[in-house]
Protein backbone atom coordinates (compact mmCIF):
# COMPACT_ATOMS: atom_id res chain seq x y z
CA UNK A 1 0.00 0.00 0.00
CA UNK A 2 1.46 3.37 -1.05
CA UNK A 3 0.73 5.83 1.74
CA UNK A 4 1.99 8.97 -0.04
CA UNK A 5 0.61 8.34 -3.53
CA UNK A 6 0.61 11.57 -5.58
CA UNK A 7 1.90 13.81 -2.77
CA UNK A 8 4.80 16.21 -3.37
CA UNK A 9 7.57 16.37 -0.75
CA UNK A 10 10.58 18.63 -0.20
CA UNK A 11 13.47 17.16 1.80
CA UNK A 12 16.41 19.39 2.77
CA UNK A 13 19.82 17.74 2.98
CA UNK A 14 18.42 14.89 0.91
CA UNK A 15 21.42 13.54 -0.97
CA UNK A 16 22.97 11.41 1.79
CA UNK A 17 22.47 9.87 5.22
CA UNK A 18 19.05 10.21 6.85
CA UNK A 19 17.78 12.61 4.16
CA UNK A 20 18.55 10.14 1.39
CA UNK A 21 16.86 7.35 3.36
CA UNK A 22 13.72 9.48 3.71
CA UNK A 23 13.72 10.34 -0.01
CA UNK A 24 13.96 6.66 -0.99
CA UNK A 25 11.22 5.45 1.37
CA UNK A 26 8.92 8.36 0.43
CA UNK A 27 9.38 7.52 -3.27
CA UNK A 28 8.53 3.85 -2.60
CA UNK A 29 5.30 5.14 -1.05
CA UNK A 30 4.48 7.11 -4.22
CA UNK A 31 5.61 10.63 -3.29
CA UNK A 32 7.25 12.94 -5.83
CA UNK A 33 10.51 14.20 -4.36
CA UNK A 34 12.24 17.58 -4.45
CA UNK A 35 15.43 17.45 -2.41
CA UNK A 36 18.22 19.91 -1.64
CA UNK A 37 21.93 19.25 -1.46
CA UNK A 38 24.91 21.39 -0.48
CA UNK A 39 27.75 20.41 -2.79
CA UNK A 40 27.75 16.87 -4.19
CA UNK A 41 26.23 17.15 -7.67
CA UNK A 42 27.25 13.55 -8.51
CA UNK A 43 25.38 12.12 -5.49
CA UNK A 44 22.37 14.31 -6.30
CA UNK A 45 22.24 13.15 -9.94
CA UNK A 46 22.49 9.51 -8.86
CA UNK A 47 19.67 9.94 -6.35
CA UNK A 48 17.48 11.65 -8.98
CA UNK A 49 17.91 8.60 -11.24
CA UNK A 50 17.28 6.09 -8.43
CA UNK A 51 14.08 7.85 -7.34
CA UNK A 52 12.81 8.27 -10.91
CA UNK A 53 13.27 4.52 -11.44
CA UNK A 54 10.60 4.03 -8.73
CA UNK A 55 8.10 5.78 -11.01
CA UNK A 56 7.94 9.17 -9.29
CA UNK A 57 9.07 12.66 -10.29
CA UNK A 58 12.36 13.60 -8.61
CA UNK A 59 14.56 16.68 -8.77
CA UNK A 60 17.58 17.87 -6.79
CA UNK A 61 18.21 21.57 -6.05
CA UNK A 62 21.54 22.98 -4.92
CA UNK A 63 20.32 25.28 -2.17
CA UNK A 64 21.48 26.42 1.26
CA UNK A 65 18.51 26.28 3.62
CA UNK A 66 20.43 28.49 6.10
CA UNK A 67 20.10 31.37 3.60
CA UNK A 68 16.72 33.16 3.79
CA UNK A 69 16.63 34.26 0.12
CA UNK A 70 17.71 30.84 -1.16
CA UNK A 71 14.89 29.17 0.82
CA UNK A 72 12.36 31.60 -0.72
CA UNK A 73 13.74 30.92 -4.21
CA UNK A 74 13.68 27.14 -3.60
CA UNK A 75 9.99 27.12 -2.66
CA UNK A 76 9.19 29.27 -5.71
CA UNK A 77 11.11 26.86 -7.99
CA UNK A 78 9.59 23.71 -6.48
CA UNK A 79 6.13 25.28 -6.74
CA UNK A 80 6.70 25.90 -10.45
CA UNK A 81 8.19 22.44 -11.07
CA UNK A 82 5.82 20.33 -8.95
CA UNK A 83 2.66 22.37 -8.34
CA UNK A 84 1.41 21.64 -4.83
CA UNK A 85 3.78 21.19 -1.87
CA UNK A 86 2.24 18.70 0.55
CA UNK A 87 5.18 17.74 2.77
CA UNK A 88 8.33 19.50 3.96
CA UNK A 89 11.03 17.57 5.82
CA UNK A 90 13.57 19.94 7.37
CA UNK A 91 16.48 17.57 7.69
CA UNK A 92 19.59 19.63 6.76
CA UNK A 93 22.05 19.66 9.63
CA UNK A 94 25.72 19.90 10.62
CA UNK A 95 27.84 19.37 13.73
CA UNK A 96 30.86 21.32 14.92
CA UNK A 97 31.51 19.67 18.28
CA UNK A 98 33.70 21.10 21.01
CA UNK A 99 33.66 21.84 24.72
CA UNK A 100 32.33 25.34 25.36
CA UNK A 101 35.75 26.61 26.49
CA UNK A 102 37.16 25.71 23.05
CA UNK A 103 34.13 26.47 20.88
CA UNK A 104 34.49 29.47 18.59
CA UNK A 105 31.71 31.95 17.94
CA UNK A 106 31.83 30.94 14.25
CA UNK A 107 31.23 27.28 15.14
CA UNK A 108 28.29 28.19 17.36
CA UNK A 109 26.72 30.46 14.73
CA UNK A 110 27.22 28.01 11.84
CA UNK A 111 25.39 25.19 13.64
CA UNK A 112 22.51 27.46 14.71
CA UNK A 113 22.17 28.80 11.15
CA UNK A 114 22.17 25.47 9.34
CA UNK A 115 20.19 23.47 11.89
CA UNK A 116 17.72 25.97 13.38
CA UNK A 117 17.47 29.09 11.21
CA UNK A 118 16.97 26.84 8.16
CA UNK A 119 13.75 25.53 9.75
CA UNK A 120 12.50 29.12 10.18
CA UNK A 121 13.54 29.96 6.59
CA UNK A 122 11.83 26.94 5.04
CA UNK A 123 8.64 27.16 7.13
CA UNK A 124 8.32 30.89 6.42
CA UNK A 125 8.86 30.26 2.69
CA UNK A 126 6.37 27.37 2.36
CA UNK A 127 3.73 28.82 4.70
CA UNK A 128 1.94 30.84 2.02
CA UNK A 129 1.62 27.82 -0.30
CA UNK A 130 0.27 25.57 2.45
CA UNK A 131 -2.13 28.24 3.75
CA UNK A 132 -3.61 28.54 0.26
CA UNK A 133 -3.92 24.75 -0.02
CA UNK A 134 -5.33 24.56 3.52
CA UNK A 135 -3.22 21.47 4.07
CA UNK A 136 0.35 20.41 4.68
CA UNK A 137 2.64 18.35 6.88
CA UNK A 138 5.90 19.85 8.14
CA UNK A 139 8.36 17.41 9.73
CA UNK A 140 11.38 18.83 11.55
CA UNK A 141 14.43 16.76 12.45
CA UNK A 142 15.59 17.27 16.03
CA UNK A 143 17.75 14.80 18.00
CA UNK A 144 17.95 12.91 21.28
CA UNK A 145 20.69 15.48 22.04
CA UNK A 146 18.13 18.29 21.76
CA UNK A 147 16.10 16.62 24.51
CA UNK A 148 18.77 15.52 26.97
CA UNK A 149 21.85 17.57 26.02
CA UNK A 150 25.37 16.26 25.42
CA UNK A 151 28.78 17.41 26.64
CA UNK A 152 30.77 18.87 23.75
CA UNK A 153 27.65 19.57 21.70
CA UNK A 154 26.14 22.69 23.29
CA UNK A 155 25.68 24.35 19.88
CA UNK A 156 24.07 21.24 18.36
CA UNK A 157 21.88 20.62 21.44
CA UNK A 158 20.71 24.26 21.46
CA UNK A 159 19.83 24.11 17.74
CA UNK A 160 17.92 20.82 18.10
CA UNK A 161 16.08 21.93 21.26
CA UNK A 162 15.16 25.16 19.45
CA UNK A 163 13.58 23.12 16.66
CA UNK A 164 11.22 21.53 19.19
CA UNK A 165 10.08 24.89 20.60
CA UNK A 166 9.66 26.36 17.11
CA UNK A 167 7.67 23.34 15.88
CA UNK A 168 5.30 23.36 18.85
CA UNK A 169 4.64 27.07 18.20
CA UNK A 170 3.98 26.40 14.49
CA UNK A 171 1.55 23.63 15.40
CA UNK A 172 -0.45 26.22 17.36
CA UNK A 173 -0.20 28.94 14.68
CA UNK A 174 -0.99 26.81 11.62
CA UNK A 175 -3.28 24.10 12.99
CA UNK A 176 -6.52 25.94 12.16
CA UNK A 177 -5.56 25.76 8.46
CA UNK A 178 -4.99 22.00 8.60
CA UNK A 179 -1.19 22.38 8.50
CA UNK A 180 0.49 19.96 10.88
CA UNK A 181 3.97 20.43 12.36
CA UNK A 182 5.73 17.55 14.11
CA UNK A 183 9.24 16.59 15.18
CA UNK A 184 11.30 13.43 14.86
CA UNK A 185 14.09 13.07 17.43
CA UNK A 186 16.52 10.36 16.21
CA UNK A 187 18.92 8.60 18.56
CA UNK A 188 22.14 6.97 17.33
CA UNK A 189 21.61 6.41 13.60
CA UNK A 190 24.28 4.61 11.59
CA UNK A 191 25.12 6.50 8.36
CA UNK A 192 28.24 7.33 6.30
CA UNK A 193 29.15 9.81 9.04
CA UNK A 194 29.26 7.18 11.80
CA UNK A 195 31.29 4.76 9.64
CA UNK A 196 34.28 7.06 10.22
CA UNK A 197 34.09 6.53 13.97
CA UNK A 198 36.22 4.07 15.93
CA UNK A 199 34.48 0.64 16.01
CA UNK A 200 34.98 0.32 19.78
CA UNK A 201 33.16 3.61 20.40
CA UNK A 202 30.30 2.51 18.17
CA UNK A 203 30.04 -0.84 19.99
CA UNK A 204 29.89 1.03 23.32
CA UNK A 205 26.98 3.09 22.03
CA UNK A 206 25.14 0.04 20.72
CA UNK A 207 25.52 -1.70 24.09
CA UNK A 208 24.00 1.28 25.93
CA UNK A 209 20.84 1.18 23.77
CA UNK A 210 18.03 -1.09 25.05
CA UNK A 211 17.42 -2.51 21.54
CA UNK A 212 21.19 -3.18 21.30
CA UNK A 213 21.66 -1.66 17.86
CA UNK A 214 22.03 1.67 16.14
CA UNK A 215 19.11 2.86 14.04
CA UNK A 216 19.06 2.99 10.25
CA UNK A 217 18.00 5.88 8.01
CA UNK A 218 15.00 3.68 7.12
CA UNK A 219 13.91 3.61 10.79
CA UNK A 220 13.70 7.41 10.69
CA UNK A 221 12.10 7.41 7.23
CA UNK A 222 9.30 5.07 8.36
CA UNK A 223 8.37 7.46 11.19
CA UNK A 224 8.42 10.32 8.65
CA UNK A 225 6.07 8.38 6.33
CA UNK A 226 3.59 8.10 9.20
CA UNK A 227 3.75 11.85 9.94
CA UNK A 228 3.59 12.78 6.24
CA UNK A 229 0.60 10.54 5.50
CA UNK A 230 -3.08 10.81 6.33
CA UNK A 231 -2.59 8.14 9.01
CA UNK A 232 -1.46 10.95 11.34
CA UNK A 233 -4.11 13.51 10.34
CA UNK A 234 -4.97 14.23 14.02
CA UNK A 235 -1.37 14.53 15.21
CA UNK A 236 0.42 17.88 15.47
CA UNK A 237 2.90 19.53 17.83
CA UNK A 238 4.39 16.18 18.84
CA UNK A 239 7.93 14.85 19.22
CA UNK A 240 8.39 11.23 18.13
CA UNK A 241 11.50 9.65 19.63
CA UNK A 242 13.13 7.10 17.34
CA UNK A 243 16.04 5.97 19.45
CA UNK A 244 15.82 2.27 20.37
CA UNK A 245 14.85 3.16 23.94
CA UNK A 246 17.77 5.53 24.77
CA UNK A 247 15.25 7.87 26.42
CA UNK A 248 12.34 6.26 28.25
Image: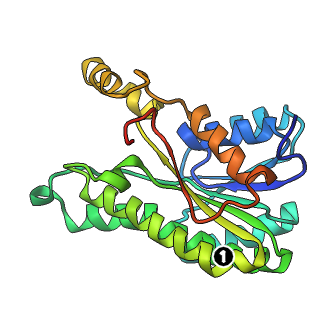
Report the residue at 53% width, 37% height from top: 17
| Left or right: residue 177 compared with residue 205 | right
Q: Quadrant of residue 218?
A: top right
Crowding near the residue tagged with mark 1, few <14, some 14–19, many ≥20 C-alpha atoms within 10 Å = many
Q: How many marks?
A: 1
Q: Quadrant of residue 181?
A: bottom right
Say if 92 sits above or below 187 in the image.
Answer: below
| Left or right: residue 134 compared with residue 232 | right
Residue 196: x percent and y percent? 35, 27
Residue under numbered circle 1: 125
The colour scheme is rainbow
Q: Quadrant of residue 167?
A: bottom right
Quadrant the C terminus occupies: top left
Front-lying residue, 9 or 96: 9
Report the residue at 45% width, 37% height from top: 243
| Left or right: residue 90 compared with residue 188 | right
Front-lying residue, 161 or 246: 246
Which residue is situated farthest in the left direction here? 101
Report the residue at 90% width, 50% height from top: 6
Question: Is residue 67 in view from this perspective?
Answer: no
Question: Is residue 90 in view from this perspective?
Answer: yes
Quadrant the N terminus occupies: top right
Residue 26: x percent and y percent? 75, 42
Give the secondary structure at mark 1: helix
Residue 59: x percent and y percent? 77, 50
Front-lying residue, 132 or 211: 211
Residue 27: x percent and y percent? 79, 40
Amino acid sequence: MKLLEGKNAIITGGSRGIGKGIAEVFAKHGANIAFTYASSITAANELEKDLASLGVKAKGYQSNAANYEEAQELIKQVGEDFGAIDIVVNNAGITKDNLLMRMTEEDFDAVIDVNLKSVFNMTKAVQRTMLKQRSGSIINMSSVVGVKGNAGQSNYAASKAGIIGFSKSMALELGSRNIRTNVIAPGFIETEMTEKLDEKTVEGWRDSIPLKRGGTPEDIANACVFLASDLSSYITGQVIHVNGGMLT
